[in-house]
Image (tube, helix red, strand yellow):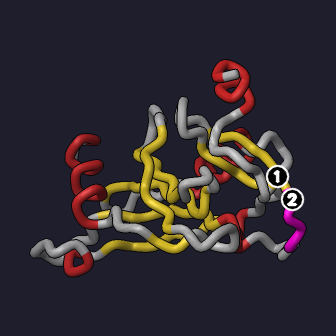
Amino acid sequence: MNPFMLRELVESKLSGTTPCFRHCSEAASLKFLQDEKFLIGAYVCPSGYVSRLVMYGEGGESNPSYLKEIVKKHGSGLIDIQDGDIRVATRHPWDLGAPGGVDLLKETYWTQSYRRSKSEDPKRISLFLCSHCSKLFTGPLDSAGPMCAECSASKS
């Protein structure tokens, strides 16, 4: 399956909204990130908070260490992430309305609210997606705006 077909499959079958976990009462929707190796999506609320990062791989393809590195890199080393924080789910043909018995894709995912610290501190560092440039950035959980520092500065 080419990358375009994979994205089309995810958009048509897996891109609904979900509650924004432990941040607000708004719905989080799927936004795709720029990545050269994998199709990666972020479930993001209107404030830019990333509830979940999901990396999609065809068939049995899964790379938890790659997703962990993305969180580490964009979390600027401020977000503690361990191997056990990354989970893998299999989407079977019947999940996606497809015939056949071969698993169609793997979802390797990280859910921000599953962090072991269980800190309820409204100032704890969290991962956000900029609404202007679509880059991941960190900020306090109670951040007021969905833009990274560079985009906020350029809008001023």
**In this picture, residue 146 sits left or right of residue 77:** left
Is 31 part of what is drawn in magenta? no
Measured as percent of width and height from the top left, residue 132 is found at 54, 32
Q: Main secondary structure of the magenta part?
A: loop
User: Do the numbered discs 2 and 1 sit on residues whose CB atoms are within 8 Å?
Assistant: yes
Identified at 60% across, 50% down, the residue is: 48
Measured as percent of width and height from the top left, residue 50 is found at 61, 56
Pointer 1: residues within 10 angstroms few (<14), some, or many (20+)? some
Which residue, given by chain and number where applicable, does mark 1 sit on? 140
Which residue, given by chain and number where applicable, does mark 2 sit on? 124
Residue 2 position by quadrant: top left
Identified at 87% across, 72% down, the residue is: 119
Label 1 sits on what residue type?
A: Pro
Q: Residue furthest front?
A: 156
Range drawn in magenta: 120-124
Label 2 sits on what residue type?
A: Arg
